[in-house]
Amino acid sequence: MSAPEEQPPAPEVGIREFQARIEAIYLQKDSARGAMGTFAWFVEEVGELSRALRRGERKNQEEEFGDCLAWLVSLASIAGIDMARAVSKYDHGCPRCRQTPCACG
Ligand SMILES: [Zn+2]
């Protein structure tokens, strides 16, 4: 997960801050499209990520990971889900076994 050495580190962004940023940029448009229409776009992006992973082009993969996360958090906003709260289930390790790393069989 380490970035190539020629790239400067990206500024830190928390999940709540990122969700607020995506809401400011897209929530109006995405809300008008509705949850299922926006979900279809999210799935389209997941397909693009799949292609990028198969092709192995790092720069393209980075873009597609970013797009997938943006669509996912936008979809969460439409559904009224706070992503920071949604991921807090991992605060104490694996939600099932409570271990880090996961020790589930
Ligand atoms: Zn586990």
Image (cartoon, rainbow, N blue to C red):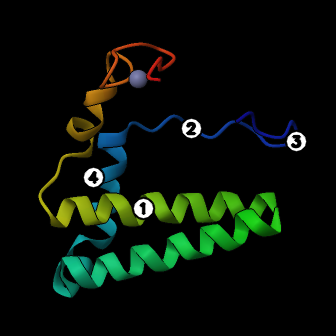
Q: Earlier in the sequence, mark 4 or mark 2?
A: 2
Distance from label 1 to label 3 (Cα)? 25 Å
SS under mark 2: loop
Say what amino acid the circle numbered 3 marks: Glu
Residue 72: name its quadrant: bottom left
Distance from label 3 to label 2 (Cα)? 16 Å
Q: Position of residue 64 (x, y in %)?
A: 60, 65
Residue appearing at x 42%, y 61% in the figure: 70
SS under mark 4: helix
Residue appearing at x 26%, y 29% in the figure: 89
Q: Identify the image quadrant of the N terminus.
A: top right
Residue appearing at x 30%, y 36% in the figure: 87
Q: For ligand 1, give the image quadrant.
A: top left
Classed neighbour count for the residue bearing mark 2: other residues with Cα under 10 Å, few (<14), some (14–19), many (≥20) = few
SS under mark 3: loop
Say what amino acid the circle numbered 2 marks: Pro
Left or right of residue 29, residue 59 in this image: right
Say what amino acid the circle numbered 1 marks: Ala
Residue 94: name its quadrant: top left
Q: For mark 4, what is the residue?
A: 20
Classed neighbour count for the residue bearing mark 4: other residues with Cα under 10 Å, few (<14), some (14–19), many (≥20) = some
Residue appearing at x 14%, y 63% in the figure: 79
Between 44 and 2, the residue placed more toward the observer is 44
SS under mark 1: helix
Q: Earlier in the sequence, mark 2 or mark 1?
A: 2
Residue 86: name its quadrant: top left
Distance from label 4 to label 1 (Cα)? 11 Å
| Numbered mark located on residue 6 in the image | 3
Say what amino acid the circle numbered 4 marks: Ala
Q: For mark 1, what is the residue?
A: 70
